[in-house]
Image (cartoon, rainbow, N blue to C red):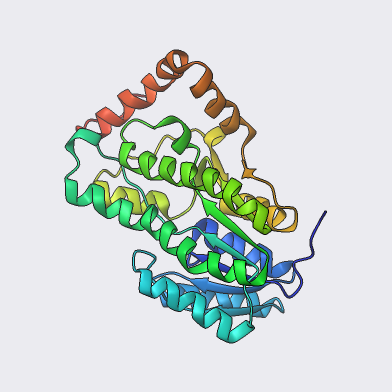
């Protein structure tokens, strides 16, 4: 049954740009009261002004999801402002191109602190609220690559696979308590993710030739998330192609390895600082 988002309260982490911002804007258009959170406060305020210009309601709260205390503060402030929280989109995260065997342990741990432990902090702060209310909807932005393990994005893929496994378990555990849990699995998305990846990797050519078939707009993904908020489903796949490829990865790992060889070779050339093959 479709649920109206009118006056429902949604918290979004990673809301300063990309999928998080797009999902927040789309939910606000449908009547939700949105709490915007990320580390860049000015970007959050820009998004809040856009929501308010459209007649919506937005609250800005700066927080770093790698800090359990800051995430708890985000939830506490949301409850103080609105009295309840109906949904929480754990979306904050980042990635970069790097050979898995060459990444330092410190950097490997750092990406898990944000992508995986950030999600754990969100769960720890919001699930008690949902339990007290007797209902709620937790959404976690994982990724298509969490299903297949993308070469040269091994650590990032690992964090997304960890999120996926956690969400799958939580869904079954929390379902009897009236709490919905949804995983979001985008394919390549036209967001700041790519700029951050290039900056961290120090490789300017990282996404230069990504086929348009494998890139979607943040707005498209945001709409899919808003629809999930209205009609909760276990998994949201904004791209049918990516869902097929993820299934193929499980059913035929040998064929998947063959299909990924061109990507692997391309990333290897980028990493070595060589010009990409045309």
**Residue 14 relative to residue 151: left or right:** right
**Residue 24 relative to residue 196: left or right:** right
Q: Position of residue 69 (x, y in %)?
A: 37, 74
Instruction: Please identify the residue farthest to the right as the structure is shown.
Output: 1
Q: Is residue 267 above or below residue 135?
A: above
Instruction: Please identify the residue farthest to the bottom as the structure is shown.
Output: 80
Depth order, front residue of 59/235: 235
- Residue at 57% x, 47% y is 183
**Residue 109 relative to residue 172: left or right:** left
Q: Position of residue 242 (x, y in %)?
A: 56, 32
Locate the C terminus by quadrant: top left
State the count of labels: 0
Q: Position of residue 171 (x, y in %)?
A: 59, 48
Residue 207 in view of the camera: no
- Residue at 39% x, 65% y is 65
Q: Is residue 104 above or below residue 130?
A: above
Residue 24 in view of the camera: yes
């Amino acid at each position: 049954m479709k649920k109206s988002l009118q006056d429902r309260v949604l918290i979004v982490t990673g809301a300063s740009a990309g999928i998080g911002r797009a999902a927040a804007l789309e939910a606000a258009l449908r009547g939700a009261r949105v709490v915007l959170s990320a580390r860049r406060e000015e970007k959050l305020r820009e998004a809040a002004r856009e929501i308010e210009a459209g007649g919506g309601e937005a609250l800005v709260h700066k927080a770093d999801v790698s800090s359990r205390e800051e995430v708890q503060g985000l939830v506490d402030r949301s409850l103080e402002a609105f009295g309840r929280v109906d949904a929480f989109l754990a979306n904050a995260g980042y990635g970069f191109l790097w050979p898995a065997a060459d990444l330092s342990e410190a950097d490997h741990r750092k990406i898990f602190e944000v992508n995986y432990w950030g999600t754990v902090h969100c769960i720890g702060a919001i699930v008690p609220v949902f339990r007290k209310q007797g209902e709620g909807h937790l959404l976690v932005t994982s990724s298509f690559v969490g299903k297949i393990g993308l070469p040269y994005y091994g650590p990032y893929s690992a964090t997304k696979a960890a999120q996926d496994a956690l969400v799958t378990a939580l869904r079954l555990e929390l379902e009897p308590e009236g709490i919905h849990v949804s995983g979001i699995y985008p394919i390549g998305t036209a967001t700041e993710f790519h700029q951050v990846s290039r900056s961290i990797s120090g490789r300017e050519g990282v996404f230069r030739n990504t086929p348009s078939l494998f890139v979607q707009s943040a707005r498209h993904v945001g709409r899919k998330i808003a629809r999930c908020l209205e009609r909760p489903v276990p998994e949201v796949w904004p791209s049918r192609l990516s869902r097929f490829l993820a299934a193929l990865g499980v059913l035929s790992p040998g064929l998947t390895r063959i299909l990924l060889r061109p990507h692997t070779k391309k990333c290897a050339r980028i990493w070595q600082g060589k010009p990409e093959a045309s």
